[in-house]
Image: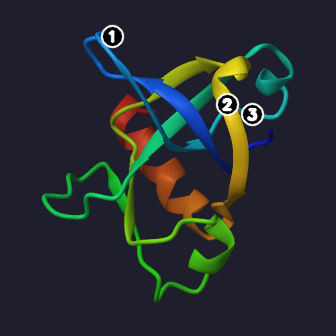
Amino acid sequence: MSRGDIVLAVVPFTDLGATKIRPVVVVSSDEFSRREDRIVVPISSSVSNLSVLDVAANPSDAGFAQTGLHRPSTFKCGNIITLNATLIKRRLGRADSYLPGIEARLRQALSL
């Protein structure tokens, strides 16, 4: 998996009480991803109540078709997660056209 890949992964809830298989986008560098872990941003199909750290993805967007997503979605850049690569099930697509917005929101979230 490389930076910008959208994959299905087993993602824990924030209280670690349960998990859910959901799409995520890999945001860790390819060099970091040579290790066993990946830094990811979860993707939600909930598109209401967006925060300033969210990036919307709509089927009408030019790069949406390559994401592998089936409905309007939100990259939740305020919910950064580190996952072991064994929790990644399969690749869905790429988030190339959304990466600049995702990177900007990550810088904002981390005050970089």
Q: Earlier in the sequence, mark 2 or mark 3?
A: 3
Q: Residue at x 58, y 86 (%)?
A: 62
Q: Secondary structure at mark 3?
A: loop
Against 14, residue 94 (above or below) is: below
x and y percentages locating residue 108 in the rendered image: 36, 42
Residue type beneath disc 1: Leu
Residue type beneath disc 2: Ile
Query: What residue would you read off at disc 3?
Result: 29
68 relative to 110 in the view: left or right? right
Query: What residue would you read off at disc 2?
Result: 88
User: Along the line of sight, which residue is nearer the eye, 27 or 48?
Assistant: 48
- Number of marks in picture: 3
The label shown at residue 16 is 1
Q: Say which of marks 1 and 3 sits in front.
A: 1
The label shown at residue 31 is none
Against 43, residue 60 (above or below) is: below
Q: Marks 2 and 3, Cα distance to the nearest angstrom?
A: 16 Å
Quadrant housing the N terminus: top right
Q: Marks 1 and 2, Cα distance to the nearest angstrom?
A: 17 Å
Q: Marks 1 and 3, Cα distance to the nearest angstrom?
A: 25 Å
Against 24, residue 87 (above or below) is: above
